[in-house]
Image (cartoon, rainbow, N blue to C red):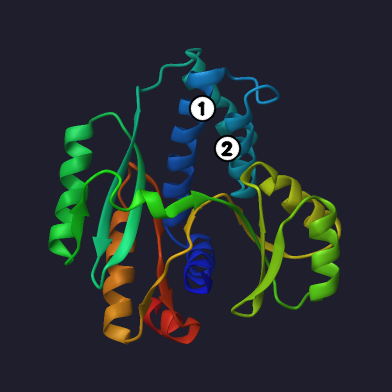
Amino acid sequence: MSGHSKWATIKHKKGAVDKARGKLFNKIARQLEVAAREAGGDATVNATLRTVVQKAKAAQMTNDAIDRAIKRGTGENDGGTYEAITYEGYAPGGVALLIDVLTDNRNRTGSEIRNIFTKLGGSMAEPGAVGWQFRRQGVVIVAGDASEDEVMLTALEVGADDVADDGGMWRITCDPSRTFEVKAALEAAGFDVVSAESPMVSETFVPVTDIDGARKVLRILEAIEDNDDVQDVYSNFDIDDDMLEAAAG
């Protein structure tokens, strides 16, 4: 999992200085709309909305922008109608990809995703072909200059399952419902939290051992993530951290 966590960290750093930040806000706003539409705009009783609000605040989205998106979802402001779809496929080298989208036009989005796979050497898969090997898990990444014992003590006290070295940082795993509780406890204790997410993770990994193969995997990941309708992309690649840095550069 270290390769995928490292890739998430690289994206986080890039997003702070380029157009990805604005694109991220658009994606989160859409998630807020859908969560509010499905179960109401009160985050104290709508657990899904509460999680997305926490995600929005972690991304430094303003309260006004969050409120506007929620009101679009509840019908107080005009908003679109989005459908949640999960696409499955393979990147070059047999790396599994699970792609969550929110779209107002499934034909357009499906065609765009398929074209990316075709153009960049991947292949679409039938529903269930990839998804069976993934499960949702809370993942909090803490900067590696912190003490492992202190990180572990704080994390376990609030219900985390494990703390592990992850390419020079600490990777804390927990039940997805406790992700932001663990994040808040670590921040309150003074630790530098790099990211906190509830991704779909796989226990089966596909090793990528050459730089050309790594670049091909990252190229298709970036192309899919750049699609406005794509919310999250999960994969099971295992790329050495140094090679991942070189391929991403």
Q: Secondary structure at mark 2?
A: helix
Q: Which residue is mark 2?
A: 52
Locate the C terminus by quadrant. bottom left
Q: Where is residue 58 drawn, in percent x and y? A: 64, 48
Q: Amino acid at mark 2?
A: Val
Instruction: Name the N-terminal-most of marks 2 and 1.
Output: 1
Q: Residues within 10 Å of mark 2 (few under 14, many from 20)?
A: many
Q: Amino acid at mark 1?
A: Ala
Where residue 246 appears, as percent x and y from the top left, is 41, 84
Tag 2–tag 1 contact (CB < 8 Å): yes
Residue at x 30% of width, y 55% of height: 224
Of 40 and 26, which appears nearest the observer? Answer: 40
Residue 32 location (% of width, % of height): 51, 31
Residue at image point 59% right, 30% down: 49
Residue located at (43% from left, 40% from top): 26
Point out which mark residue 35 bears.
1
The answer to whether residue 203 of the structure is visible from this angle is: yes
Mark 1 lies on a secondary structure that is helix
- For label 1, the crowd category at 10 Å Cα-Cα, with few meaning under 14, some 14 to 19 and many 20 or more, is many
